[in-house]
Image: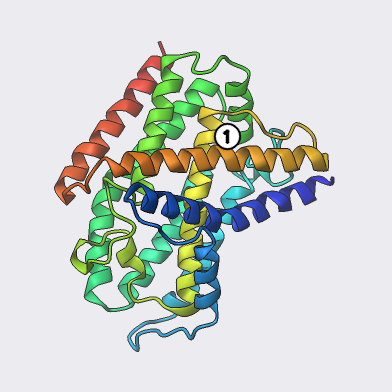
Amino acid sequence: MNLYVAQGCQVLFVLGFAPLLKGVMERYRARLAARHGPPIWQPYRDLWKWLHKETVRSHHSSAVSEWAPVVYFIAPILVTMLIPVLTSFPLPFAWMGDMLGGGMVLAGGGLALLFAALDSGSVYPALGVSRIRLIATFTEPLSLLLVFVAASAAKATIPFVVNQTFASRLWFASPAHLLIVVGWFLLLIAEAGRIPIDNPSTSQELSMIDPSRTFESSGPDLALYEWGGWMKFLVLSVILSNVLATPWGLATSPAVGAVVLAALAVALKVTVLGLVLVSIEAGFAKLRLIRNVDFLMAAIVIAALGGLVSNL
């Protein structure tokens, strides 16, 4: 298989598997609550429905609302080209940016969504944006700290190099490695808007945080926002599983069979991670907004300890 074809397979994997992961997690969440739940294919049906509906925008909106869905949708795809999704060897676009650059791309997509939410002129998206920026005050330093700590522990910033460095060591060979994994898991909860930070399935306008950004969106705009959000969660989960926690099971050659087996292995790892996350959510309630600061400060302390240990 050509390296550019392998690069395309990574993108197709993220595009195609992200809705399925969302469906599996929602079905499992319903089962834990003793409900039947929607089929795991429901996200694909929702995308089909939204893509075939008309887009309705506020009369007060500007061009920001037109390009923001595309930017938010493309951001996780760009990061997919930088990280080891299916292969343990670098692909042609792997050298375009490091872990810090990938984080800036995802942050840029989120910033475009925030601008679009404010551009709608509605009060509920604006309320959600103010809450999100409060949380981001702590998640952005946390993400930077984790990137620097991982780079210090692996002596590299390119995700493929970090993957190979951690894969060559014993599993959780150092306390710093364990602290990095725990810190990134807590960051994943906050960035994906999961319980206890936020409830992604809430329908209460005044309690929405992450879903409030798309409160005024419809049609293809909503499809791009939702699909982009699912891909963002998958990308962050892939970084946790393939780069930090379990950096093995990836294809070591561009052979078709190796890439297919890697896709199955990564799908299994990310699905298990998602089910663990849902299981943890089932035992917690959503935190009050002011209590989110305590959760994020604990994550920052864990990341700082990882940095301290890695330099001892």
Q: Residue at x 57, y 22 (%)?
A: 166
- Asked if residue 247 lies left or right of residue 181, the reply is right
Q: Which quadrant of the rendered structure holds the N terminus?
A: top right
Q: Is residue 270 visible?
A: yes
In this rendering, the answer to whether 210 lies above or below 87 is: below
The answer to which of 196 and 71 lies nearer the viewer is 196
Q: Secondary structure at mark 1?
A: helix
Q: Residue at x 31, y 26 (%)?
A: 302
The answer to which of 252 and 176 lies nearer the viewer is 252
In this rendering, the answer to whether 43 lies above or below 64 is: above
Furthest residue in direction top, as rendered: 312
Furthest residue in direction bottom, as rendered: 59
Kind of residue at badge 1: Asn
**x, y percent for residue 36:** 40, 57
**x, y percent for residue 25:** 45, 50
The answer to which of 40 and 311 lies nearer the viewer is 40
- Tell me the quarter of the picture where residue 146 sits: top left
- Asked if residue 10 lies left or right of residue 31, the reply is right
Q: Residue at x 54, y 23 (%)?
A: 154
**x, y percent for residue 84:** 63, 39
Name the image colouring. rainbow
Q: Which quadrant of the rendered structure holds the C terminus?
A: top left
In this rendering, the answer to whether 58 lies above or below 44 is: below
**x, y percent for residue 164:** 64, 26
Residue receiving disc 1:
242
> How many C-alpha atoms fall within 10 Å of the one at disc 1: few (<14), some, or many (≥20)?
many
- Asked if residue 193 lies left or right of residue 170, the reply is left
Q: Is residue 86 visible?
A: no
Q: Residue at x 60, y 52 (%)?
A: 14
- Asked if residue 168 lies left or right of residue 52, the reply is right
